[in-house]
Amino acid sequence: MWAVIKKELKQYFCTPIGYVFIGIFLIAFSVSFYFTVIGYGNVNYEYIFYSTPTIFVLAFLIPLLTMRSFSEERKNGTEQLLLTSPLSITKIVLGKFIAALIVTIITAIFTLMYFGILCYFGMPQISTAIAALIGFILFVMAYIAFGMLASSITENQIIAAVISIAFFIITWVMPNFNSNLQSFSFINMLYKYTSGQIDIADTVTFITFTIACILLTIIVMQRRKSIK
């Protein structure tokens, strides 16, 4: 599995993908920092994760990481090598998932410099900031897992990205149409963490959804391996 992780990280950082992801996210985070913190004169680092620029950009950035996970292998004809490698499908899927997650964790670490700036000018709540970071990582885990599932069912990277973005936007806006759907909105769950609440039910939901998507991806790839 570590070989897969190293291979994926090499692809992320030996190509512009990883740097574009980190750069664009930090630009969006900076815009959010200006409007939600400087604009209102507060020291709430956690609010930045829930602001519109951050969420909107994240909707398009995660598919940038996940759309190539399996679609690219299939398009380039390297899927056969992947399926016949000594590594199990489970290790391959987990390796790709962990590599994408590492990129987002590195990005989250970079955002701590904004927390440092706030510490210089005031006293932000550390516990709330930690809760926001935990919620952000859980949210990203679920989105990455779904993006990989979308990539496993199509050989077209663009289609995989569109499926992931559509899923993100639908779960974002559906509470606006029916308030009963709020419990199914990952964005609403993320908001609780940015408010300093680590809800056990939401945490279980994020983790369960992530595991379910990973298992479905493994099943899809196992079926493709059996066909091959």
Image: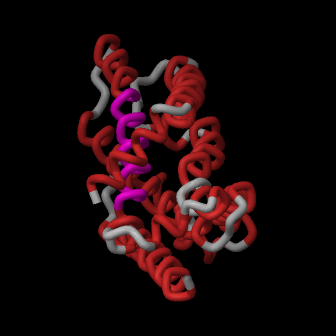
Inspect this view and state whether residue 168 appears.
no
Q: Quadrant of the N terminus?
A: bottom left
Main SS category, magenta section = helix
The residues colored magenta run: 95-111
Q: Residue 92, position in %: x, y?
A: 38, 65
Q: Residue 136, position in %: x, y?
A: 42, 48
Give the camera-side residue of 150 and 55: 150
Inspect this view and state whether residue 97 appears.
yes
Give the camera-side residue of 219 and 115: 219
Q: Where on the picture, by quarter, is residue 173?
A: bottom right
Q: Residue 7, position in %: x, y?
A: 39, 47
The answer to whether residue 43 is above or below residue 89 is above
Residue 217 is one of the magenta-drawn residues: no
Q: How many discs mark residues in the rendered view? A: 0
Give the camera-side residue of 125 and 172: 172
Q: Quadrant of the C terminus?
A: bottom right
Q: Residue 130, position in %: x, y?
A: 28, 42
Along the horizontal axis of the image, is 62 left or right of 138?
A: right
Please report the residue visible at 31 percent of the width from the left and 19 percent of the height from the top: 116
Residue 110 is one of the magenta-drawn residues: yes
Please report the residue visible at 40 percent of the width from the left and 72 percent of the height from the top: 205
Please report the residue visible at 41 percent of the width from the left and 39 percent of the height from the top: 10
Please report the residue visible at 45 percent of the width from the left and 33 percent of the height from the top: 13
Give the camera-side residue of 56 and 121: 56
